[in-house]
Amino acid sequence: MEVTVHSSMCVASGNCGLVAPAVFANPDENDGFVELLDPHPSEPEAAAAREAEYLCPSKAIQIDRHPIPPPRPVPESDSPTARPD
Ligand code: SF4
């Protein structure tokens, strides 16, 4: 299992640290935002990590998936500020 967290998507709900404290932490010094403790947990922590992924309100946790790619640039012709010729 490979656990990935997208910190910029975290809303500091604290669910992950409660459900899977061996995998995630939400330290006060980080204002409750997620900190990944173990990116390769074994059972039973792996099951807890899957539950945390399910419960994460912002979908900041991904398990065994490719990271979210950066947004594609909008072609100038599709830009809302583009003017027709
Ligand atoms: S459950 Fe999701 S939103 Fe909540 S602290 Fe963990 S990663 Fe952040």
Image (cartoon, grey):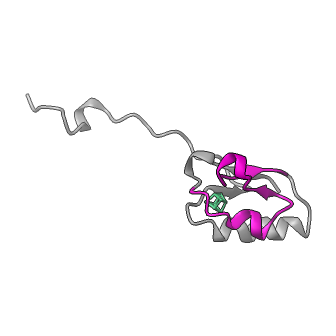
Name the residue at the front extreme: 28
21 up-or-down from 72: above or below: below
Residue 2 placement, left or right of 44: left
Residue 47 drawn at (x, y percent): 82, 70
Residue 63 placement, left or right of 72: right
Query: Camera-side residue: 15 or 64?
Result: 15
Query: Camera-side residue: 85 or 68?
Result: 68
Kindly identify the residue that appears in the image at 61 percent across and 55 percent down.
Answer: 60
Kindly identify the residue that appears in the image at 73 percent across and 71 percent down.
Answer: 51
Kindly identify the residue that appears in the image at 26 percent across and 30 percent down.
Answer: 76
Residue 36 placement, left or right of 10: right
Residue 53 drawn at (x, y percent): 68, 65
As for residue 19 lying within the magenta part, the answer is yes
Residue 56 drawn at (x, y percent): 63, 65
Residue 85 placement, left or right of 6: left
Q: For the magenta stretch, what is the residue range?
A: 11-38
Task: Tell me how many marks there are.
Answer: 0
Residue 58 image-quadrant placement: bottom right
Residue 14 drawn at (x, y percent): 67, 63
Kindly identify the residue that appears in the image at 8 percent across and 28 percent down.
Answer: 85
Quarter occupied by the N terminus: bottom right
